[in-house]
Image (tube, helix red, strand yellow):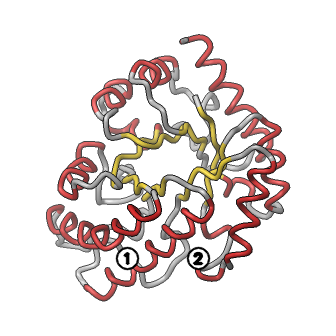
Amino acid sequence: MKYAICQELFEGWDWADQCRFIAATGYGGIEVAPFTLASHPREISADRRQQLRYEADSYGLQIVGLHWLLAKTQGLHLTSPDAAVRQRTAEYLRDLTHLCGDLGGEVMVFGSPFQRNLAEGMSFSEGLDYAGDVFVQVLPTCAERDVTICMEPLTTKETNFINTCAQAMELIRRLNHPRFELHQDVKAMLPEGIPLPDLIREYSAHTKHFHVNDSNLLGPGMGETDYHPIVAALLETDYAGWVSVEVFDYSPGAEHIARESINFMRRMEAEVG
């Protein structure tokens, strides 16, 4: 398996120091939260993009892509009934797509729970219409830059729009575009009530990115989730994308979380394999 880690865990570290530590810990990829680089992708110059990519590469790391796409933005929303807001959101996502491509990234994970919530009284179908309108405006740029947007189902505690893999697939099938696929996240899938291995197998043809973590918001192996069947399902379905560590509780420290997570995942892979 190919292992990456989401680098907002290291926010405040110099980029080169992040890359050095992540590579030394054994990861092959680094997944970027854009807000850690600048408040807007247009603020990141061509030279800076080249430098970020060069430094990651110099440590043997691939920048696998972006996530937290709309975090810390203002005036952007995926399901807004206001066409002007949707257009601004699409423009921002196009800017992110160019950033992702310039960094050598392949995927952009669309989570951003607050910026996709349905307004009071809005139906799920209307939300699909509005979200589809935004993504249709972005997908030609994705095709141009070889970047895939991966829709991430999130729990009902986080958002009221797209809470299951099946709901994400409704949007994926509606758009029917090779650059719009599914993202799966262990923490987010746990409340679905369907065994995670079944979800992995059922949607394997569309899953292009995978986050590992646990219900306690820490890394894999730091909670109660049994990872043996999860890893077995990934191997069984020949999952070829990145397995990326994403945590939300940083209290044990970035170094500890990073080391424990990859060591655990490698142990699971060896035991299952």
Amino acid beneath label 1: Ala
Query: Which disc number belongs to residue 41?
Result: 2
In the image, residue 220 above or below residue 55: above
Q: Considering the image in quadrants, where does the C terminus appear?
A: top right
- The residue at 59%/46% (across/down) is 246
Q: Position of residue 248 (x, y in %)?
A: 60, 50
Q: CA distance from mark 1 to mark 2?
A: 13 Å
Hey, which quadrant is residue 199 in on the image? top left
Crowd band around label 1 with a 10 angstrom C-alpha radius: few (<14), some (14–19), many (20+)? many
Query: Which disc number belongs to residue 90?
Result: 1
Residue 104 visible here:
yes
In the image, residue 18 above or below residue 34: above
- The residue at 48%/40% (across/down) is 210
Question: In the picture provided, is 47 more to the left or to the right than 118?
Answer: right
Amino acid beneath label 2: Pro
Residue 213 visible here:
no
Hey, which quadrant is residue 75 in on the image? bottom left
